[in-house]
Image (cartoon, grey):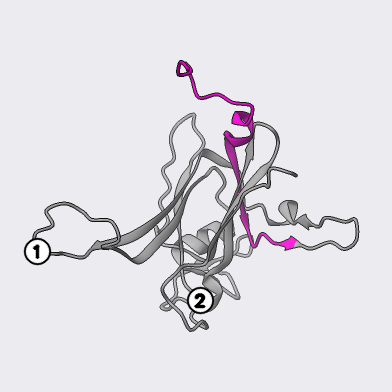
């Protein structure tokens, strides 16, 4: 039998993620009962519009155990030693929430300018500076959502804004996933990817 000219199958539209997707803070699934399948709180958790999309990166850290006489990498001698999970987002909006997250800043109780809130620096990272989760929601060509969620997300890239004539300013922010300090195991990160079942 001759090999095909391309890899397109009937499942191809189900597996192509199309568009920039959306970014959410605190995305949750509420389970239903009976015939109610449950729902995600998409509308309540949207962070802001993007320009240039976003990039998800989940990278296992690995170590190759050295063995005398093995001059190449050997199966079953590779050990997972950790992992890193980040999401880089290009926000077209600059909100108070985004500024505070990027600078690890805080809103002052009072402002010296009555028409504006004052965001200022602080010395320590507080528990509340970590987002419960940051989520990317993408859509396949056949209309199904794929969700990637990083828990205990902290912006580790800082705040950098560049304004240009005749262009909207876009800020790039990197959210980094952290293990929960209340757990008793620290060898995996709390990231989750929800992929639609073929039967749905």
Q: Is residue 10 magenta?
A: yes
Left/right of residue 63 with respect to residue 131 in the rendered view: left
Q: Residue at x 41, y 43 (%)?
A: 162
Q: Residue at x 84, y 61 (%)?
A: 32
The span shown in magenta is: 1-29
Q: Which x, y percent locates residue 60?
A: 37, 59
Q: Which x, y percent locates residue 103?
A: 45, 63
Left/right of residue 90 with respect to residue 36 in the rendered view: left
Name the residue that disc number 1 marks.
68
Left/right of residue 84 with respect to residue 114 in the rendered view: left
Q: Which x, y percent locates residue 7?
A: 50, 24
Pointer 1: residues within 10 angstroms few (<14), some, or many (20+)?
few
Q: Nearer the viewer, mark 1 or mark 2?
A: 1
Q: Earlier in the sequence, mark 1 or mark 2?
A: 1
Tell how many labels. 2
Q: Which mark is residue 180?
A: 2
């Amino acid at each position: 039998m001759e090999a095909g000219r391309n890899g397109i199958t009937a499942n191809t539209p189900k597996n192509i993620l199309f568009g920039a997707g959306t970014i959410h803070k605190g995305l949750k699934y509420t389970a239903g009962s009976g015939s109610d399948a449950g729902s995600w709180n998409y509308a309540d958790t949207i962070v802001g519009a993007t320009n240039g999309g976003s990039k998800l990166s989940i990278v296992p850290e690995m170590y190759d155990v050295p063995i005398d006489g093995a001059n190449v990498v050997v199966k079953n001698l590779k050990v997972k030693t950790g992992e890193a999970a980040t999401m880089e987002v290009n926000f077209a909006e600059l909100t108070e929430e985004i500024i505070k997250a990027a600078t690890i800043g805080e809103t002052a109780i009072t402002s010296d300018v009555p028409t504006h809130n004052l965001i200022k620096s602080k010395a320590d990272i507080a528990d509340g500076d970590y987002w419960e989760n940051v989520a990317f929601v993408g859509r396949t060509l056949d209309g199904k959502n794929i969700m990637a969620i990083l828990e205990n997300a902290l912006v580790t890239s800082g705040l950098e804004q560049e304004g240009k004539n005749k262009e909207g300013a876009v800020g790039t922010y990197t959210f980094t996933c952290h293990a929960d300090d209340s757990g008793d195991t620290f060898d995996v990160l709390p990231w989750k990817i929800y992929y639609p079942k073929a039967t749905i």
